[in-house]
Image (spheres, grey):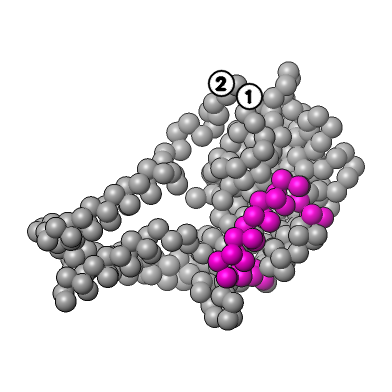
Amino acid sequence: MRRKQFLFAAVAALALALTPGLAEARAGGGSSMGSRGGMTFSAPRSTNTAPYAAPMQRSMTQPSPGYQSPGYASRGFGRSSFGSGLMGGLIGAGIGGLLFGHGFFGGGLGFGGFLGFLLQIFLLVMLARFVFRLFPGARRPAMAGGPNIFARTSPPASGPLPGAGGSGGAPPIAINPADYQQFEQLLAGVQAAWSAHDLNGLQAMATPEMVSYFAEQLADQVSRGVRNTVTDVHLASGDLAQAWAEQGREYATVAMRFSMIDVTRDSAGRVVDGSPTEHVTETEVWTFVRSRGGRWLLSAIQQTR
């Protein structure tokens, strides 16, 4: 009987570890995807809001042959298959030991010790989250004044931007307050259309590439019998990382820290992730593109952790 209980708990732990998480369920699903023109595979410039942006995980833009982005060369492992494989190996080894009568991790730690270890990690995470929420000012750096809260600094005009492709690179462009206002409106608008499963609305605010990724993620929600909604979106801080022109288009990459109510419910309306009353804060790097004189469209989202 005791062996069966151990096996049940081990299988449950394995299923929990391998089940795709819902915590990153907002538009974009917590992944880095899209295109930044010739800058797609170059790291955006660091800003106060986002010192680091993760490299693209999915993009329809193809890197040039033999291209290696120096901007990402020393970022460490990040979210790699190495970590997932290590966790899977540990759990697999534990279940193997359990089946052969040596305990979850052999005679040293034992299954009960492993559960105690997981409980300690859980308590530490909850404590860290509690402390983090006690000091909201620590995660909201000082911002420039003005009608919007984006920093009013465009990239320096003292030469082309590196890594933009083509001879001579890409010349920087100026971004004005009306552009920042569009960026903020797109942040809220994309999340609203995402929550409503409104693909027509997303098509009016994002490139076809980004809409295809959103449609795939929304279909995954439908298949899993859940629905994510993101409401009450407020921009907390924003910085311009890069703004440039290439091949008749203009691009702007901005770092944005924003709060929102991010909740996922099942088909019966029960909350399966998030809170319908508690705001969460995230930081992402969004890139926008437009034809010269046109309106901005979302062309890429990159994560910052």
The amino acid type found where label 2 is placed reads Gly
Reading the image, the residue beneath label 2 is 66
Q: Quadrant of residue 280?
A: bottom right
> Looking at this view, is 140 or 32 the one in front?
32
Residue at screen point 73% across, 18% down: 167
**Residue drawn 69% across the image and 24% down it:** 165
Q: Which residue is most to the left? A: 107
Q: Is residue 157 visible?
A: yes
Circle 1 crowding by C-alpha within 10 Å: few under 14, some 14–19, many from 20: few
Mark number displayed over residue 64:
1
In the displayed structure, 85 sits above or below 16; it is above
Mark 2 crowd level (few <14, some 14–19, many ≥20, 10 Å Cα): few
Picture coordinates of residue 276, whole percent (x, y): 58, 78
Q: Looking at the image, do the residues carrying marks 2 and 1 touch, with CB atoms under 8 Å apart?
A: yes
For the point 37% across and 43% down, the residue is 82
Residue type at mark 1: give it: Ser
Alpha carbon separation for disc pair 2 and 1: 6 Å
208 magenta-colored: yes
SS at mark 2 in the image: loop
Q: Position of residue 78 (x, y in %)?
A: 44, 44
Quarter of the rendering occupied by the N terminus: bottom left
119 lies above or below 66 = below
On the rendered structure, is 228 left or right of 92? right
Toward which corner of the image does residue 279 lie, by quadrant? bottom right
Where does the magenta region start and end?
203-231
In the displayed image of the protein, which residue is found farthest to the right? 293
Residue drawn 78% across the image and 30% down it: 246
